[in-house]
Image (cartoon, grey):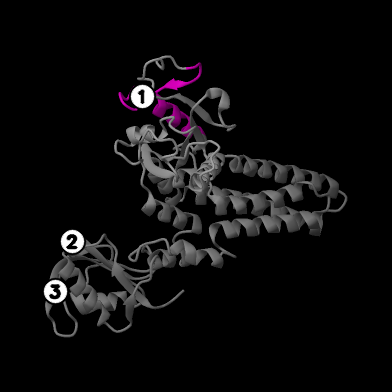
Amino acid sequence: MSRDTIFALSSGRPPAAISVIRISGPRAHAAGEAIAGELPGARQAGVRELRHPANGELLDEALVLRFDAPASSTGEDIVEFQCHGGRAVVDAVLSALTAVEGLRFAQPGEFTRRAFESGRIDLTEAEGLADLIEAETESQRKAALALAEGGLRRQIEIWQGQVLVLSARAEQAIDYVGEGEAEEVGVLSRDCAALATELREWLERPRAEPLKDGIRAVVAGPPNAGKSSLINAIAGTDRAIVTDIPGTTRDHIDVPLALSGLPLLLTDTAGLRDTDDRVELMGVQRAQALVERADILVWLGDPEKVVEHGRTILVHAKADLPGRDEAPAGSIAVSSVTGGGIDQLLRRIEAMAKSILPAEDALSLNRRQAGHVEEAEAALSDAAGSADLILIAESLRAARQAFDRLTGRAGIEDVLDALFGRFCLGK
């Protein structure tokens, strides 16, 4: 771990009622005293005058907090100034800190990285914090908070404990089991298989990415089917150009929405048809690609010509027009002019989205986490299928290493910079 003492503004950009400036590292207390004088007791707050260490100029009157290592968020000594949130005040205090010897500005995510390196949090909790900062919907917030508070870490600790016990039994059997080796191998294989089954069940759960990135509901169909009008009606604003000219929409338009707290990305696409227009053809090809990648397909067109997709909602658009008041069986009649049927359509999209997303009270794995769980599951399956104690012990060792990579204890240097680079400067 770097032994530099770092500082940064840890609250939002000024102006604000209050701004929090954080200092962390071996010289944090000395830096705090250089600006605020005598610090309050550990984990206590005190009002202090903040003065420039070079000339004693009064900068602000602030609430000062002190934390002693290792009982702090970073595991290091920390001082926090809760000062007035004007730009001039914040700039003056930060400028004063640059005059203190041995201090430097923190890099993005450096406070959280130090918390990880000191063992205050593991990699899954750090990922949860990054997701929490970026959360835009209630579902995203709840999922990120469960991760940040150590929900997955506690589950991994259970798995690690089980694998450790299995490894100890395998190593002991290698050294001491004689005639009973076959029986011990059978018991170990059964227990390894049981744990591998549990990991497979976790891998079959809905993943975290759709919750983080949003469920993509692609609105598709032939030209002039009412796709753009429907997008505008749902968004409550004119996001897409609407005309009676076929082929108006050439490129896709994404409209992010929060549907009952669920993240949704509603996508308008070019009308699907054969065309000799090169530009329109590019739009049609993009639309076809989006349909293939869609989580939910909202089809406006002839139900018999619907593009094959696993999750499709049939929409009978322009239901306000003469002769279109009766929808085909299985279709939802919708009018973008009157708003009729839109609530029903949104309820259908919401129900379908919930079947894709993790339940609010369930932990979910992201792509990186699932990859290491798959490694552990494969190693345990190898152990369960082996009749050799030495091979079983080696497979269990591989499972332990996979869990270590999952929590960040080993072999994850390639992901750390990318992860902590997602954080803001004062986090």
Q: Nearer the viewer, mark 3 or mark 1?
A: 1
Please name the amino acid that badge 1 sits on.
Answer: Ser
How many other residues sit within 10 Å of disc 2, few (<14), some (14-19) or many (≥20)? Answer: some
Q: Is residue 353 above or below residue 117?
A: above
Residue carrying label 2: 15
Quarter of the image where one finds residue 58: bottom left
Counting other residues with Cα less than 10 Å from the Cα at mark 3, is it few (<14), some (14-19), or many (20 or more)?
A: some
Pick whichever of labels 2 and 1 is earlier in the sequence. Answer: 2
On the question of residue 75 being in view, the answer is no
Q: Is residue 401 above or below residue 213?
A: below
Earlier-in-chain disc, 3 versus 2: 2
**Residue located at (43% from left, 14% from top):** 326
Secondary structure under tag 3 reads: strand
Residue at the far left in the pictured view: 58
Nearest the viewer among 374 and 49 is: 374
Q: CA distance from mark 2 to mark 1?
A: 45 Å
Name the residue tied to disc 1: 335
Q: Where's residue 87, x and y in %?
A: 18, 67
Q: x and y percent of residue 38 in the render?
A: 19, 75
Q: Secondary structure at mark 2?
A: loop
Mark closer to the chain start, 3 or 1: 3
User: Comparing marks 3 and 2, which lies closer to the viewer?
Assistant: 2
Q: CA distance from mark 3 to mark 2?
A: 16 Å
**Which residue range is magenta in the image?**
328-355
Residue 339 lies in magenta, yes or no? yes
Amino acid under label 3? Answer: Leu
